[in-house]
Amino acid sequence: MKLLVVFFLTGFLLGCIADSAYFPPGLAKEDAVYLKADSERDHGIFQGLDEKLYINTVNGVSIGGFFNGYYESAYIEPGLTEIDVGFYQGKVKSERCLKFLAEKGKSYIIRKKREAWSINFWIELENDINTNVVNLPCGE
């Protein structure tokens, strides 16, 4: 019984410290583009106040879900990329499509701004002091 408890605790702790970024099979890390979401998790036990932003699909392929978790970061292939993102805060949710040209070796961040009942999403090059928006309209 003790061995079983130790086994589950070890698995739980390893799961907590593991890299939670999505990594597609067959993609070499040196060829990848890193994409992360600008989630806010500052409210501790008041998780309903946290603003969570997840990457739901990359180029039409679902990368997250109830059983395998929802990703806040992903390694993706370079090139023109279309993603679907989801915003969740308590009972408020919004989903949107974003498209951008992902350049090899660069990191991007998905930003959001909530204004009343609307939520705007955009993508920026991470650590860019000019904070230039790099996304394009979806469907074009």
Image: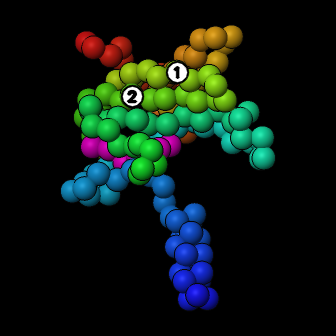
Residue at left offset 61%, top offset 88%: 2
Magenta residues? 70-77
Image quarter hosting the N terminus? bottom right
Q: Mark 1 points at which residue?
A: 94
**Type of residue at label 1?**
Ser
**Type of residue at label 2?**
Asp
Residue at left offset 59%, top offset 71%: 13
CA gap between label 1 and label 2 equals 10 Å
Q: Mark 2 points at which residue?
A: 84
Q: Relative to residue 89, is residue 11 depicted above or below?
A: below
Dividing the picture into quadrants, the one containing residue 131 is top right
- Can the viewer see residue 111 in this picture? no
Q: Is residue 20 left or right of residue 80?
A: right
Magenta stretch containing residue 74, yes or no? yes
Query: For this rendering, which residue is in front, 47 or 19?
Result: 47
Residue 15 x/y as whole percent: 52, 65
